[in-house]
Amino acid sequence: MSYEVNIEYKDDLIKVYTSGAANSKDSFNLLSSIVTSCKKHNCYRVLTKSGLTSMSTITAFDHIKMYEDLEITNRKYKIAWYVAAPQMRERVEDIAAMLRNRNIVDVYVFSDYAEAQQWLLQDK
């Protein structure tokens, strides 16, 4: 299965939609595109609706270096990931916990899209 991505600026958020299986290259390209969109719109609140179907453990751990290399940091970014599939939510929650525990970025995972959006906008 291929990996598909759509990114748009809407409702004062960078909205990201993904589907399919992601490898490290896909993840890096996605994050690079998010950074570009954030800079273009001067908006660093990112709402990701993930249709991720699989991700290896190695790819998950690669996210730490990707976020650091792309300078996706607490100083600017606030990221909410909505993941409907429980099996993938656990993998994404692991990534989010690693990023938060290393104080890299403010990122949380949600099982409810409206709740994710509300969290992003709560202190705007």
Image (spheres, rainbow, N blue to C red):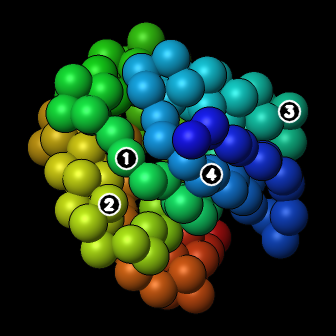
Q: Residue furthest front?
A: 1
Q: Compared to 77, does 112 lie above or below?
A: below
Residue named by callout 2: 88
The residue carrying pointer 1 sits among few (fewer than 14), some (14 to 19) or many (20 or more) residues within 10 Å by Cα, namely some
Label 2 or label 1, whichever comes before in sequence order? 1
- What label sits on residue 54 in the rendered view? 1
Q: Are marks 3 and 4 in contact (CB under 8 Å)?
A: no
Residues at marks 3 and 1 touching, judged by CB atoms closer than 8 Å: no
**Which of the pair 113/108 is nearer the observer?**
113
Q: Quadrant of the C terminus?
A: bottom right
Residue drawn at the location 47% of the way across and 61% of the way down: 81
Give the residue pinned by disc 3: 40
Q: CA distance from mark 4 to mark 1?
A: 12 Å
Q: CA distance from mark 3 to mark 1?
A: 30 Å
Instruction: Give percent across and percent down for residue 115.
Output: 49, 86
- Is residue 111 shown to the viewer in this render? yes
Question: Which circle, 3 or 1, is nearer the viewer?
Answer: 1
Question: Which of disc 4 and disc 2 is earlier in sequence?
Answer: 4
Q: Is residue 58 left or right of residue 116?
A: left
Provide residue 102's location: percent of width, then percent of height: 16, 34
Residue 85 vs residue 13, the one in the foreground: 85
Specify the amino acid type for callout 1.
Ser
Disc 2, disc 1: CB below 8 Å? yes
Q: Work out which residue is located at the far top of the displayed protein and give it.
A: 69
Sequence-wise, the earlier of marks 3 and 1 is: 3
Which residue does the numbered mark 4 point to in the structure image? 18
Q: Could you say which quadrant of the image residue 60 lies in?
A: top left
